[in-house]
Amino acid sequence: MTEVVAGYDTCPVYAPAFGYIGAAGCMILANFGSAWGTWKAGCGVCKMGIIHPAGIIKNIVPIVMAGGLGIYGPLLAAI
């Protein structure tokens, strides 16, 4: 019996490399964006603490959302 593998005759050998590059790029860019967003939101919270100290707790949401992006990136890369 011969083994029939679909797709190997049409795909080039280097095709999986593009998949790995895409997954790595997704993780790298998502985590870089998360770090950048956390930094910018943290600077905003620091300025808010100086100008209007009562509103610090309300402005923690962007920091949490930026952390969520750092978790979403590896999930998207795994898919």
Image (cartoon, helix red, strand yellow):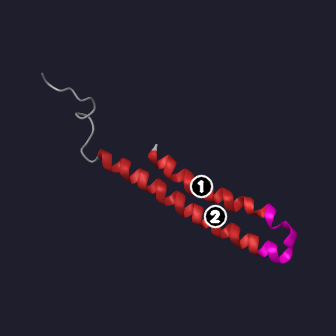
Q: Is residue 50 found left or right of 11 in the rendered image? A: right
Return the x and y of residue 10 as percentages of the image width and height: 26, 34
Return the x and y of residue 36 as percentages of the image width and height: 60, 66
Return the x and y of residue 1 as percentages of the image width and height: 12, 21
Location of residue 1 with respect to 76 vertically, above or below: above
Say which of 29 and 64 sits in front. 64
Q: Quadrant of residue 42?
A: bottom right
The residue at which mark 1 appears reads as 69
Location of residue 40 with respect to 18 vertically, above or below: below
What residue type is disc 2 on? Gly
Secondary structure found at label 1: helix
Location of residue 5 with respect to 63 vertically, above or below: above
Marking on residue 37:
2
In magenta, the rendered stretch is 47-58
For the point 85% across and 73% down, which residue is it?
A: 53
Q: Is residue 39 found left or right of 53 in the rendered image? A: left
What residue type is disc 1 on? Leu
Q: Is residue 18 found left or right of 73 in the rendered image? A: left
Q: Residues within 10 Å of mark 2 (few under 14, many from 20)?
A: many
Q: Is residue 75 found left or right of 20 in the rendered image? A: right
